Image (cartoon, rainbow, N blue to C red):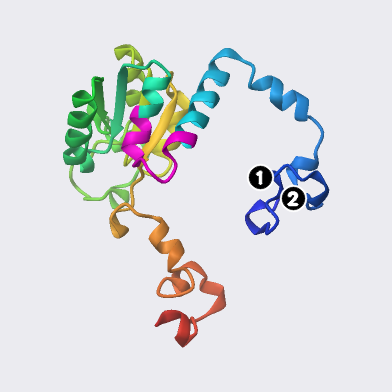
């Protein structure tokens, strides 16, 4: 069992092997094998340029600026956007920004191909609006369309949970995330995490009962 989330040493960041916890994956054999994986041409290219973006833009560049910096360092000029139809307004702005900075952009919305949800064996009550036609989200179609367009790096913009997984599985080009969908929290899912011991406690920890007064204040 790995418990990096609870680790307070973070010795892997300093390379202090003697301080690795017992269940630390850094203790496991295969370090040379892992290093060898980063000698592969494409993976090495991505890893090196990602490290350069981190080094030169950390806590200074916004996410969209980091993406453009990464694309330039990788010599990518044709970018793809896989977006939710609910974020088309945002996709327009993202496209404008990318084009203003010298990139060509292809964007494909999630409802492409207008495939009916009935093909997923969904009952009417399992639709957002029962009794009406609803197109299923089609992340595989998004990935295929962007592959046909020849995009070199694809940006995820607000795809649903699970649909983003399918897009990343089927994308030919590397994928990076610009924003994830969380309509309740203004597409800022970490807000629920920051409030996990406060206002969202009972919803996120139902077995623990009510939060204490101090945490919810």
Name the residue located 44 percent from the left edge and 75 percent from the top edge: 198
Q: Secondary structure at mark 2?
A: loop
Query: On the rendered structure, is 165 left or right of 43?
Result: left
Q: Is residue 59 magenta?
A: yes
* 212 is higher (above) or lower (below) than 153: below
Name the residue located 29 percent from the left edge and 13 percent from the top edge: 149
Disc ID at residue 1: 2
Tell me whether circle 1 and circle 2 mark residues in contact (CB < 8 Å): no
Name the image quarter holding residue 184: bottom left
Name the residue located 31 percent from the left edge and 59 percent from the top edge: 185
Q: Residue furthest bottom?
A: 213
- Residue marked by disc 1: 13
Name the residue located 19 percent from the left edge and 38 percent from the top edge: 88
* 91 is higher (above) or lower (below) than 170: below
Query: On the rendered structure, is 173 left or right of 103?
Result: right
Q: Main secondary structure of the magenta part?
A: helix
Q: Is residue 63 magenta?
A: yes
Query: Which of the two discs, 1 and 2, labels the residue nearer the N terminus?
Result: 2
Q: Secondary structure at mark 1?
A: helix
Label 2 crowd bin: few (<14), some (14–19), many (20+), radius 10 Å: few
Query: On the rendered structure, is 212 left or right of 11?
Result: left
Q: Nearer the viewer, mark 1 or mark 2?
A: 1
Percent x, y of residue 60: 38, 43
């Amino acid at each position: 069992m790995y418990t990096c989330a609870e680790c307070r040493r973070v010795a892997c960041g300093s390379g202090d092997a003697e301080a690795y916890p017992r269940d630390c994956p850094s203790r496991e054999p295969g370090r040379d094998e892992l290093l060898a994986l980063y000698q592969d041409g494409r993976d090495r290219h991505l890893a090196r340029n990602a490290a350069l973006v981190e080094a030169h833009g950390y806590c200074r560049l916004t996410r969209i600026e980091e993406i453009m910096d990464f694309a330039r360092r990788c010599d990518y000029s044709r970018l793809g956007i896989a977006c939710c139809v609910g974020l088309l307004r945002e996709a327009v702005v993202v496209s404008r920004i990318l084009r203003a900075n010298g990139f060509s952009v292809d964007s494909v919305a999630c409802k492409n191909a207008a495939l009916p949800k009935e093909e997923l064996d969904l009952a009417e009550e399992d639709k957002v609006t029962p009794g009406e036609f609803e197109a299923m989200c089609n992340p595989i179609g998004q990935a295929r369309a962007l592959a046909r367009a020849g995009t070199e790096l694809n940006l995820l913009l607000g795809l649903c949970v699970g649909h983003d997984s399918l897009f990343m599985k089927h994308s030919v080009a590397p994928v990076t995330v610009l924003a994830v969908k969380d309509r309740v929290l203004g597409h800022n899912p970490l807000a629920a995490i920051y409030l996990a011991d406060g206002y969202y406690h009972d919803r996120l920890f139902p077995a623990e009962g009510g939060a204490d007064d101090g945490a919810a204040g």
